Amino acid sequence: METYLGEKQQARQWSPYINNGGSCLAVAGDDFAVIASDTRMSLGYSIKTRYSTKYLKITEKCSIVSSGMQADIFTLHKVLKSRAQIYEQKHGKPMSTDAVAKLVSRLLYYRRFFPYYTFNIVAGVDEDGVGCVFSYDAIGTLERVKYSASGSGSSLIEPVLDNQVALKNRNDIKKEEFKLTKEYAIDLVKDAITSAGERDIYTGDFVEISVIDLNGTHEDKFELRFD
């Protein structure tokens, strides 16, 4: 289409959202939870930084990991940490994991008309000492599950967790005989995100992994591939 001056019109599009990639996952056991995320921040085929965290420890018994747009992740985590501190100062005790999960849901729903571009997983142990994982959609619908994955490598990680935790398509072991131990879950989370980094160009560099149990949060870090 041409204007009256003979110049061609060009369609211009702009989006407030970008996806900076990365992968997150969490697995819950009987009395623990393991949560992990990588630190790569990408834009297109460029790596902007290798040290961008997607992880936030909210309390000693609850943490969150988020993938998506780094600016929104930073903002959501900042608001969440602030609200958790206000709660602790007001009530004299830290928030429970269930309370944190519901707070994240409300923060996301509050922004439903201009959502945070984040894909979140909350993990920890509840007030009964049972491991728990909460997954969310973009506007705060939450579900308590045994495991979850989000981010650019989630399609590679989820089938591994389906097979190794939910025992889907397994004929070699009965569900009632299977017990998910802490050591097995840690190794599984490490293997799952490492293998995702071999196939997904947006997952890599380092992994921040935390094991949460009744004694608190135990954090660790290990390397992935750098290319």
Image: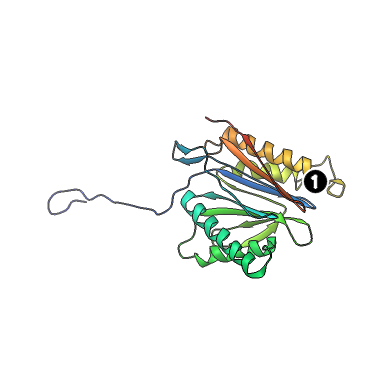
Q: Place residue 97 in its image quadrant.
A: bottom right
Q: Residue furthest right?
A: 177
Number of on-image labels: 1
- For the residue pair 105 and 71, the one nearer the viewer reads as 71
- For the residue pair 47 and 197, the one nearer the viewer reads as 47
Q: In the drawing, does residue 179 fall left or right of residue 218? A: right
Q: Position of residue 178 (x, y in %)?
A: 84, 46
At x 30%, y 51%, the residue is 12
Q: Position of residue 222 (x, y in %)?
A: 63, 35
Q: Position of residue 20 (x, y in %)?
A: 48, 45
The vertical placement of 179 against 106, above or below, is above
The disc labelled 1 sits on which kind of residue?
A: Leu
- For the residue pair 92 and 161, the one nearer the viewer reads as 92
Q: Position of residue 190 (x, y in %)?
A: 68, 38
Q: Residue furthest bottom?
A: 90
Q: Residue furthest left?
A: 5
What color scheme is it?
Answer: rainbow
Q: In the drawing, does residue 113 fall left or right of residue 176? A: left
The vertical placement of 51 against 215, above or below, is above
Q: Secondary structure at mark 1?
A: loop
Q: In the drawing, does residue 122 fall left or right of residue 216? A: left
At x 77%, y 54%, the residue is 214
**Number of other residues with Cα within 10 Å of mark 1, as a class: few under 14, some 14 to 19, many 20 or more:** few
At x 40%, y 54%, the residue is 16
At x 78%, y 44%, the residue is 182
Task: Please give the residue where the numbered disc 1 appears in the rendered image.
Answer: 180
